[in-house]
Amino acid sequence: MHNVYKPKIIFLMFAIGTLLALFIPSAQADHIDELIRDLQAANESTRQQAVEALGKTGDSRAVEPLIAALKDPDWKVRLTAVEALGKIADSRAIEPLGMAIDDSSLYVRQAATEVLGKFNDPRAFELLTKTLKNQDIYIRQSAVETLAKIGDTRAVELLAAAAFRDQDAKIRQAAIEALVKIGAPAIQPLTTVLKDKNKDVRLAVIETLGKMGSFAVQPLSTALKDKDANIRLAAVKALGKIGDARAIEPLIATLKHDDTILSGIIRMAAVEALGNFAKLGDSRAVEAVIAALKDSDLYVHHVAATVLKGINDPRAAAALVFRPKPGLAG
């Protein structure tokens, strides 16, 4: 009996599946059409709910109606339309979203800026580039946050420009924090900015690189040769905090050859930085700090002596016992 009914059951299931396959798309189409009609409702809440529902469908047929909803008189409907278009991510929405950046509502402007970051399209990126020059500080900040999420080479270059060029301190700080989070990909653009003619810009770059760990050792080492003493000093301190052994030789060179204005202060900082490596047992650093006992600057001499007292190395102890007077080669 079981075998007699089995073919019939299979046929019935197949028939039901076929009917559902025919019915569901039709029902979905009717649902989308109904939602599109609701966009013309007098009640703004009904329009907003319809916009939100269209975004959840992910259906390409919803794109054009949602673009039209970007011009709705109610800002909440426009905001929801921006978010819905972001969910569907159809390229037809890029230019309309670019226009939404100039919306009368701050919330809509910010949302449009953020949503553009979801499109892997040159047009969207170009629009984001323009927002960095927007007079509205909140839009520029949204652009910085969006570019930080993208994180590719193009985004990093724009963030570097914002970090050191934007007139607002909050934007600069946000861009700097974004670059630090991005890490290694941000090094090359920052290295380029280190050549800027403005020393304040270069100093800001040094401070940023100092937060980026070992990735930044090479450009910071290069900055030890900067013509401005304050830049060199900042680079020495940054390398000391990072603690990467690749910085030892450049720091030793600075200790030996920096004899310009503020050179004593720079050599003191180099001794302190090398002291961190000496405490870890690096022989090169220990010898460099011992040599600094002969420095012509009394303060450099005393800093070297202080550092050596904290090093558990017999060479340090012997150097302190027989240390020469500052500036003498004894």
Image (tube, rainbow, N blue to C red):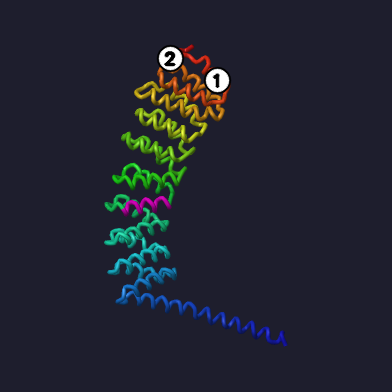
Q: Nearer the viewer, residue 77 or 312?
A: 312
Q: Position of residue 110 (x, y in %)?
A: 34, 58
Mark 2 closeness class: few <14, some 14–19, many ≥20 residues within 10 Å: some
Q: Residue furthest top?
A: 330
- Residue at 32% across, 36% down: 200
Q: Amino acid at mark 2?
A: Gly
Image coordinates of residue 260 in percent, x first then y, are: 36, 22
Q: Quadrant of residue 50?
A: bottom left
Highlighted magenta segment, given as a residue range: 138-149
> Of helix, strand and loop, which mostly describes the magenta segment?
helix
Tell me whether circle 2 and circle 1 mark residues in contact (CB < 8 Å): no
Q: Compute the Cα span from label 2 to label 1.
A: 20 Å
Front residue of this view, candidates 31 and 136: 136
For disc 2, the marked residue is 327
Which amino acid type is shown beneath numbered disc 1? Ala
Report which residue position mark 1 lands on: 317
